Image (cartoon, grey):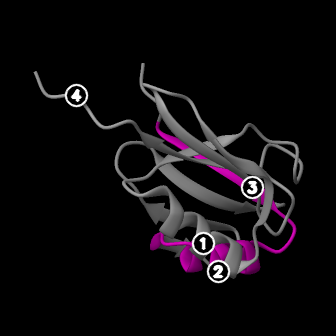
Amino acid sequence: MKVKHVYLTAIQPARLAEFYANSGLTVRFADGERWIQFRTEGAAFCVAGLEESASTPSANAVVVFEVEQLEPVLDRAVAAGATLIAPVRDMGSHGRVAQVRDPENNVIQFFQAAAKADG
């Protein structure tokens, strides 16, 4: 079994999709405001309108995006309308994570893996 895609339900799908585009994702496919899918590595990340979704807005799982450099992505997300929930958390040898709320109040995280030790 594999994860095909993960999506957030949005009251204003175009506005939420614009937030994610401004945060650094690229739209792969859009069916108006019913379904907007972004290019990612692995499973697809999408925004769904109310008529397309099996969930309610802001009642979704937390989506975690793995990023190469945490601060530039976090800065772009905040500039695009995200609200920082807590300071960046250092998880030692695992990496670092930042937690924000997108413009529709979904909690998302940006994760930067720790550098691998040589040896």
Q: Nearer the viewer, mark 2 or mark 3?
A: 3
Cα gap from disc 3 to disc 1, whole angstroms:
11 Å
User: Where residue 13 is drawn, which disc sits there?
Assistant: none
- Residue named by callout 2: 18
Q: Is residue 78 above or below residue 90?
A: below
User: Are the residues at dot 1 and dot 2 in contact (C-beta closer than 8 Å)?
Assistant: no
Cα gap from disc 4 to disc 3, whole angstroms:
29 Å
Q: Quadrant of residue 9?
A: bottom right
- Residue named by callout 4: 117
- Residue named by callout 3: 100
The amino acid sitting under disc 4 is Ala
Mark sitting earlier along the chain (2/3) = 2
* Residue at horizontal 75 percent and vertical 80 percent from the top: 15
How many other residues sit within 10 Å of disc 2, few (<14), some (14-19) or many (≥20)? some
Q: Quadrant of residue 117?
A: top left
SS label for mark 2:
helix
User: What residue span does the magenta drawing correspond to?
Assistant: 4-28
